[in-house]
Every structure is written in structure tokens, then in C-alpha cells.
Image: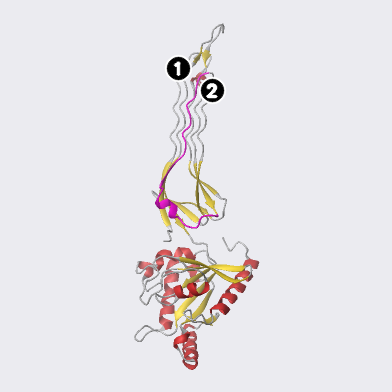
Amino acid sequence: MKFVDEATIRVQAGNGGAGCVSFRREKYVPRGGPDGGDGGRGGSVFLVADAGLNTLADFRVQRRFQAAHGAPGAGRNRSGASGADLEVPVPAGTRVYAVETGELIGDLERPGQRLLVAAGGEGGRGNARFKSSVNRAPRQSTPGTPGERRTLRLELSVLADVGLLGMPNAGKSTLIRALSAAKPRVADYPFTTLHPNLGVVNVDAHRSFVMADIPGLIPGAAEGAGLGIRFLRHLARTRLLLHVVDIAPPPGSPEPADEARAIVAELQKFSPELAARERWLVLNKIDLLAAAERARRRATLVDALDWRGPVYEISALTGAGTRPLAGAVMDRLEALAAVDPAGGD
């Protein structure tokens, strides 16, 4: 199923009910008077984070949401019923923006969180409210106020523990296929990944993590080139980044160190905070090299990047080295969770 990461919806809160103009007229009651009741309040619209949702796909079908209107007031000082509030479920991790202003209204990070996005209108006042010593038979009332109407942009940040970075055809999709049940498209041409893919990596009993594969980045992505920069927001909540590098590029391709530096430059342009996140170097396609040549290329790359972090050698195609990598990632995630259970959110 195609991953939908953005949606635009329209929400309309209920209007307040009108106040009533009424006078008490009952047989054998010597004194009447105004008894018009107030109108009911209109229903409000709330967005609620739902742990059972993981995409915004439903909003491709339904885009308009309307809360109930308040009922008008009635005689005998009867107030109108308030309109029922409307709760719209969205995936946890959804950010909500006002389309008109671009303002961030709220961030629904955890299941159960509620966000008021459109307030219901106030009910009008009945004529009983206007009675006074100098105005004993008021014939005025007020209408209810209209409910808020807004156009919202929903933006979903995938809640993944680990994010994969790399140039097109570095082998990220093959890696997520090797470690999880996710089945992204894999082919021998660039940009086969056109939308984010999620995979659950099971290390052993009761130990697993979620990995996100995004479209490959290319130089100039921060200015709109390629596809990956559009999805970098999905890595904003990850705890660990795996930088996948093709250690055996085809003849005529840029050097792996140059491509690795280009990825870091695009991260810096997009978000210095994301660029500073813990990142491991994963050298892919070792099955294409002899042991001696592999060791030479690794040493050259590490020296060129002045790399001080962990380095792993894998073949995503054959599976060599992938399980030790998954185990090391799991251990690191558990260590990070022990220090910061909230993940820095």
C-alpha cells in the first residue's frame, strides 16, 4: 500500500443555536413574562491520536468533517441541546498546520492525545436574559455564533527507531527486505524507492525495532533535487541513523567518500539537529569484493571521512553481516532507551 504522509482536510465546528423569544401564557397564572431559553453550544472538532493507525490514507477518501450544531432555545426557559463534539482519529506522530497561515497548531505525539482544532459556536441568548425592571417584556434575542471553520494540513512523521540514509541504489531497500518482512521495490536503477517503507526487525524473542527506508538523497536535495528531502522529516524522531554506502560502486561512479560527504551536507542543510544525531557507517555490497580489496577500500573510506563511529560491513543481497548489525542496533537502542525513555520528544 502506498504510504501517505500528508493530507489536507477541512473541519467545521457546529454553530450555536439561536436564543428564543417566548412569553409565559398559562391559564390561571396571573403573571406571565418572558421565558425564552438560550440556544445550545455548537459541537467542537478534536483530532485524537490513535495507536491503531499508521498512515493518513483514510483522508484521501474523506476530507470534510462537520460537528453537530447546537439546538435553538425554547419557551419555558428551556435551553437548546449542545451539539456533540466530533473526534477525528489520526496516527500518533501527526503534526497539524493551519493552511492559511502555515502555523503549527499542535503535535499529536502519543496515543490518546486530543487537540482542539475548531471550537463550536456559542449559543444565543433567549429573551428571558433581557428582562429588567425597565424592560419587562423584551422581544429581543441573539443568534448563535458560527463555529470555527479551518483548513488543516496533516503531516505524519513515521515513528521509526532507526532510519536508513544513502544515495540511490546504495542498497537500503535490499537491507530492509533482508531484515524485515517489508517488501519495497528493488531494481538496478535509481529512485526505485518512491515513498517511505517501514519494517519491523525481530532480533529475538521480545526484542524488535522499527526501521525506516526513505528515497535516496542526491546533491542538491535541499534545493528540491530528487525525492529524499521531502521525506527527511520521517527521520526526525529516530534514535539512530544507518548511513548505507555502496563500497563497490560501478566504474565511473563518484568515490564512496564523496557520496558520503554529500549526504552529510544535505542533512546539515535540512536540519543541523538531525545531522548531529548518532550515525553508523554501513558498507554494503561486500560480496562483490575480495577480502583484501574490501579491507583496502574500508580503510580508504574511513580515513577520507575521518570516521570515528561504528563501521559495519554487510551484503544486503546475501545477508552476510546483517544479523550482527541488527543485534548491535538493538543493543544500542536499549541502551539509549535506558538513558532517555521518551526518546528526546
> Which residue is farthest right?
338
Q: Nearer the viewer, mark 1 or mark 2?
A: 2
- Between 335 and 278, the residue placed more toward the observer is 335
> Which residue is farthest bottom?
292
* Amino acid type indicated by mark 1: Arg
Where in the figure is residue 147, as x and y percent of width and height?
44, 37
> Vertical placement of 325 versus 297: above or below?
above
Q: Are marks 1 and 2 in contact (CB under 8 Å)?
A: no
Task: Check disc 1: other Cα within 10 Å, few if <14, some if 14-19, many if 20+.
Answer: some
* Amino acid type indicated by mark 2: Arg
Q: Which residue is mark 2?
A: 78
> In the figure, is residue 251 to the left or right of 282?
left
Where in the figure is residue 206, as x and y percent of width and height?
63, 67
Of the 4 image quadrants, the one containing the N terminus is bottom left
Where in the figure is residue 37, as x and y percent of width and height?
51, 22
Does residue 102 appear anywhere in the picture?
Answer: no
User: In the structure shown, which secondary structural element does the residue marked by tag 1 occupy?
Assistant: loop
Q: Which residue is mark 1?
A: 139
> Vertical placement of 41 versus 131: above or below?
below
Where in the figure is residue 312, as x and y percent of width and height?
53, 81
Q: Could you say which disc has been placed on residue 115 in the image?
A: none
* Magenta-tinted stretch: 51-75
Is residue 63 located in the magenta-colored stretch of the structure? yes
Is residue 251 located in the magenta-colored stretch of the structure? no
**Measuring 54% from the left and 7% from the top, which residue is drawn there?**
27
User: In the structure shown, which secondary structural element does the residue marked by tag 2 occupy?
Assistant: loop
User: How far apart, in angstroms, are the residues tagged by discs 1 and 2?
Assistant: 17 Å
**Measuring 47% from the left and 77% from the top, which residue is drawn there?**
244
- Mark earlier in primary sequence (1, 2): 2
> Vertical placement of 202 versus 66: above or below?
below
**Prevailing secondary structure of the magenta residues:** loop
